Amino acid sequence: MRVKLALVLVAIAAAGCAPEARTRALADLNLSDPRVVEDVLSDLPADDRGAFSTFVVHHLATSKAFCGEVLLDEQGRQPTTVGEAIRLTRLREERLNAVPEVVNPDRLDPDARHQYELAALLEAHRRLVDSRETLMMVSGEKARDRVAQLDREIAVAAERLEQARAAGPAARQET
């Protein structure tokens, strides 16, 4: 009985020594290593995993899918902990997902309509790339078939975007 009690106490003490995932310093983590990311994700509550995955995939300058916007807090500083990265990612996602003003493209002049359509194509492309990068980060090789499908969809979206750019106002003026 004493042995079991001692083992339980040792386990509780060891668990108390492990840093809570949200307080882990980002500087101490090699977030370009998928195993490290998986380790952090496994220590986070389920509702924090998506935000941290988004941070790793889109807000680290070393990521292939870096969105170009480094997350900054209210004082203009980059996050230093996993928890800060999650909080700032959620704030940015809320801004991105805010319901935009409803626009009727038919009421826009041709240049404004073209810009509106380009923005929609860019957003569709961004969402596909986001899906692929997140899937690769979270599922790795297990998602190979779905990643290949997303790669094909991304290529189609990129082609549509290039076609729209080529058909834009500047192209019409050159003819």
Image (tube, grey):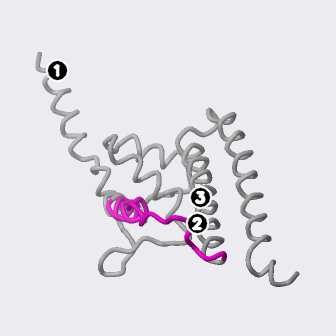
- Of residues 95 and 136, the one nearer the viewer is 95
| Residue type indicated by callout 1 | Val
- Of residues 50 and 101, the one nearer the viewer is 101
- Of residues 40 and 171, the one nearer the viewer is 171
| Residue type indicated by callout 3 | Arg
Q: Is residue 98 magenta?
A: yes
Q: Is residue 11 above or below residue 70?
A: above
Write down the region rendered in magenta. 87-110
- The residue drawn where x is 74% and y is 66% is 164
Q: Which residue is mark 3?
A: 126
User: In the rendering, which numbered label is found on residue 106?
Assistant: 2
Dot 2 falls on a residue whose secondary structure is: helix
- The residue drawn where x is 67% and y is 44% is 150
User: In the rendering, which numbered label is found on residue 3?
Assistant: 1
Quadrant of residue 161 within the rendered picture? bottom right
- Spatial CA distance of label 2 from label 3 is 24 Å
Dot 1 falls on a residue whose secondary structure is: helix
Q: Nearer the viewer, mark 1 or mark 3?
A: 3
Residue extending farthest to the right is: 175
